[in-house]
Image (spheres, rainbow, N blue to C red):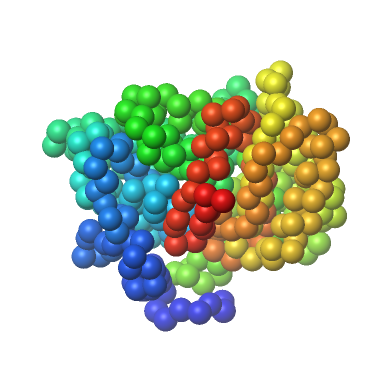
Amino acid sequence: MKKFMNEPENFINETLEGLLSAHPNKLRSVREDNKALVRADAPIENKVAIVTGGGAGHLPLFLGYIGKGMVDGASVGEVFTASSAQQMLDTTKAVESGKGVLYIYGNYSGDVMNFDMAAEMAEEDGIRVETVIGKDDIASMPIEQKEDRRGVAGIFYLYKLAAAKAEQGANLEELKEFTEKVNNQVKTIGVALSPCVLPNVGKPAFTIEENSMEIGMGIHGEPGIEKGSLQTADEIASNLIEKILQDYGNEKVENVSVLINGLGSTPLEELYIVYRKVSLILKDKGIDICKAHVGQYATSLEMTGLSISLLNTNEEIRSLLELPFSTPFHEQSSL
């Protein structure tokens, strides 16, 4: 194992200390262990607060989306481990301003259990909470069981659009309804070429043979749906896009936003090669791209691989996608 770290047990603590030190104008901690982070200017008056959270090892997911035009706070667990209900509750209390709180997080059992507990405790304290669970990973379950799908990189769109809608003054109920509609229009599938190494384990979490790949592998190393020989970038793009478009079924898909996400070690050059082919495929099918995102959005430590997400848009979604945001990892101006 070769990693830039000190003692493995301090991996997350020192990561959080570094983030807080590097971005004091964007982030602040509300717990001594730094496992609950919020916007530096939280709470924001007259706005529904948005809270997320989950295990570390996926930066910029989850805490990396704290900031103006994005989420208000995030609870942080150890690597690939759900944060605690108390950490989530502390985050909730620090960002709530009287308009209620919307929880947005990925569909993993530990997160669901602990966020549900935090919501119950928050409501006992008089804080209204609603929940939207990201379920964009089409490889994790067939369409007939889409409610059981995992949440992966496509959760970026839930954050972006829910936050923009909240800043326009939507109340908690309106925000939940809108975000659920967005949730149903986001679809993601990934491919992995090499494993990651958990700091406290010191060896690869799984194996992928040389010159092989696995389609549909999850961001924690969950098994994929296809194993085979390594394909070219164009072949991979075509394969993944075909699966996503098939999953939309009979829905009308005319204008989309595209997110090409690197899983940790994939160079940007390679992500843009894949985006090139995706754009050509969609153009050939008469599908317009309103906005593209290419980069690291939901990683798995140093896993080599990528995922493709499509968001089926409408006029309102396209308008909200253009609004500015500012986080430690990504910024979008109003230009």
At a point 81% along the width and 30% down the height, the residue shown is: 286
Report the quarter where the N terminus lies: bottom right
15 relative to 332, above or below: below
Q: x%, y% of residue 142? A: 63, 28
At a point 35% along the width and 56% down the height, the residue shown is: 76
| Number of marks present in the image shown | 0
Along the line of sight, the residue nearer the viewer: 85 or 207: 85
Judge left or right: residue 8 versus residue 286: left
Q: x%, y% of residue 248? A: 68, 26
Along the line of sight, the residue nearer the viewer: 182 or 44: 44
38 relative to 245, above or below: below
At a point 38% along the width and 68% down the height, the residue shown is: 23
8 relative to 314, above or below: below
Residue 168 seen: yes
Give the quarter of the image for residue 264. Answer: bottom right
* Residue at the limit of the structure toward the front, as seen here: 335
Residue 108 seen: no
Along the line of sight, the residue nearer the viewer: 169 or 76: 169
* Residue at the limit of the structure toward the top, as seen here: 250
Q: x%, y% of residue 115? A: 32, 40
At a point 46% along the width and 79% down the height, the residue shown is: 5
Q: x%, y% of residue 29? A: 27, 62
Along the line of sight, the residue nearer the viewer: 178 or 308: 178
Judge left or right: residue 318 versus residue 278: left
Judge left or right: residue 80 versus residue 318: left
* Residue at the limit of the structure toward the left, as seen here: 125
